[in-house]
Image (tube, rainbow, N blue to C red):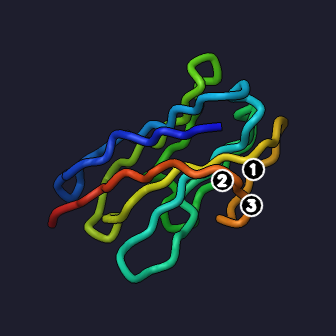
Amino acid sequence: VQLQACGGGLVQAGGSLGLSCAASGRTARSYAIGWFRQAPGKERDIVAAISGSGAGTYYADSLKGRFTISRDNPKNTVYLQMNSLKPEDTAVYYCAARYASGPNYYSRPSDYDYWGQGTQVTVSS
């Protein structure tokens, strides 16, 4: 599967931004998807994850209530809506996929087999 992440950009603190991850290849519902982010000099951390069916979702504790992950399987696309953005949310955001239909989601980078190219999100103070 190939993943194309887009939607990043520059936004002021308190603003919102929506990212999308378009998947090509096998049927989207065959894949669990995760959003990760990596700031300079830091490890790649989980942001949110969603199961292939969309029934299961996971959020990093610090992001609950501000970020929402969703998917539109007929469009082969997963979305990440980010609200109330803070300067510490600045990072390159990546989407990743692994073959897994059903309700399971995955939160570790090593759980995923396919990665998109990343999209830069910059939040100014």
Q: Quadrant of residue 25?
A: top right
For residue 58, the mark is 2
Q: Nearer the viewer, mark 1 or mark 3?
A: 3
What's the amino acid at mark 2? Tyr
> Quick check: 76 above or below 118?
above
Give the SS element for disc 1.
Answer: loop
User: Would residue 19 be found to the left or right of residue 22 on screen?
Assistant: left
The numbered mark, 1 or 3, whose residue comes first in the sequence reads 1
Which quadrant of the figure contains the N terminus? top right
Q: Are marks 1 and 3 in contact (CB under 8 Å)?
A: no
Q: CA–CA distance between discs 1 and 2?
A: 7 Å
Q: Are marks 1 and 2 in contact (CB under 8 Å)?
A: yes
The numbered mark, 2 or 3, whose residue comes first in the sequence reads 2
Spot occupied by residue 45 in the image (x, y as percentages of width and height): 54, 69
Q: Nearer the viewer, mark 2 or mark 3?
A: 3
Spot occupied by residue 88 in the image (x, y as percentages of width and height): 32, 71
